[in-house]
Amino acid sequence: MLCAPQLLPEWAKQEAIILAWPDEFTDWKPWLKEVRETYRELINGITNNETGVILLIREAQVENVKAFLQNMKNVLLVSADYNDTWCRDYAFLTCRAGEENIPVEFTFNGWGNKFDAQKDNGINQSVLAKLCKNPLISIPLVAEGGALEINQDGYLLSTELCLTNPQRNGEMTLSSYADHFKKHLGATQFSALKHGHLQGDDTDGHIDTLARFTPHNGLVIQSCFNRPNDDHYQGLSALVNEVKQCFPSASLFELPLPYIVNNVGERLPASYANYLVNNGQVLVPTYQQPEDQEALEIVQKAHPDYSVIGVDSLSLIQQFGSIHCISMQVPKGTLKTDVLAEFGPALTVHKNG
């Protein structure tokens, strides 16, 4: 009998990262050239770090992508149909139970029924579960991976604004959420932060845009210390104070806030906290802004034993997300042996894809 499962932190050893290819049937249609260059840069950073990439892709895109990524290694193209590319919020999470990794999923309903997500919600059962050694567990709850942050001690962090949106789970209380997270994700402690929200954020304040645990008893926080006259200053300052109260013994690392608007003047929710931890490196979004270098230096201080690499993500923020939003890590010991064998020195099309 398996031990009770516990959600693995992002810095657990990984064997792959899940991405979904942006095409003309996703929201990336107006920015396809730019966003595909970002994907290529991200994929290159992951695969050069001895980590596979599971790239969900529509059948019609396979040949074009094989040409576009022709010199890439450790890329596995897996046929799938999806609404969009925000894998963080619909791809399975991974829990550890004894010596086994267990893929688990929540229901994904487009961040509280804001967008059609029927295809995305079916990806785990129809595609990804077949790649895993152990059966997928479906948790009877609406939630997204970007809303959940956990450390090695099982402390799970989220945000109140996101969880209490009635379009997710009705009038479910935070206490009930805590019970679910303890039962299904092995959370030993749980906090839902009340403060902090970025203009333009469709997710109701996902934690991965605001506060991230580090492996060294630290937290990286998307602050606004550099912009005291910004509309975000009060809310993000309150977030910093709240985190200090919740974690009085932790080391805190505050990130500067960039100011980016799109071509119609809308403020974009650019966050440097939306980075991906990957096998001893941190892939950090940069936005061609003056704050980029300072943000990289702060992330480096927060992860002294890691390589910190900037990835130009100005294209990603045009659709209100960034690197963490489009990716989901697969910890070592999750995938079937024959799936792992398909990763190699050249891009490969999954045999059953």
Image: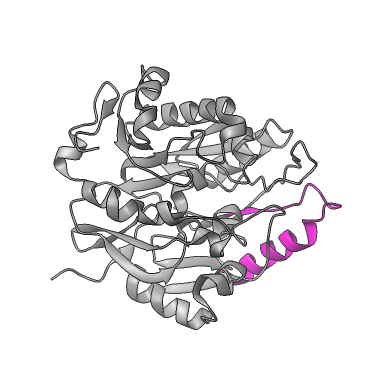
The answer to whether residue 187 of the structure is visible from this angle is no
Which residue shows up at 47% across the image and 26% down it?
40
Q: Is residue 92 magenta-colored?
A: no
The extreme right residue here reads 229
Instruction: Tell me the quadrant of the picture where the C terminus can be found.
Output: top left
Q: How is the image coloured?
A: one colour
**In this orientation, which residue lies closer to the viewer: 185 or 20?**
20
Q: Is residue 91 left or right of residue 228?
A: left
| Magenta segment | 220-246
**In this orientation, which residue lies closer to the viewer: 17 or 130?**
130
The percent coordinates of residue 204 (x first, y second) are 62, 62
**In this orientation, which residue lies closer to the viewer: 242 or 329?**
329
Which residue shows up at 39% across the image and 24% down it?
65
Which residue shows up at 26% across the image and 46% down it?
332
The percent coordinates of residue 295 (x first, y second) are 64, 40
Which residue shows up at 53% across the image and 44% down it?
275
Residue 5, quarter of the rendered image: bottom left
Instruction: Tell me the quadrant of the picture where the N terminus can be found.
Output: bottom left
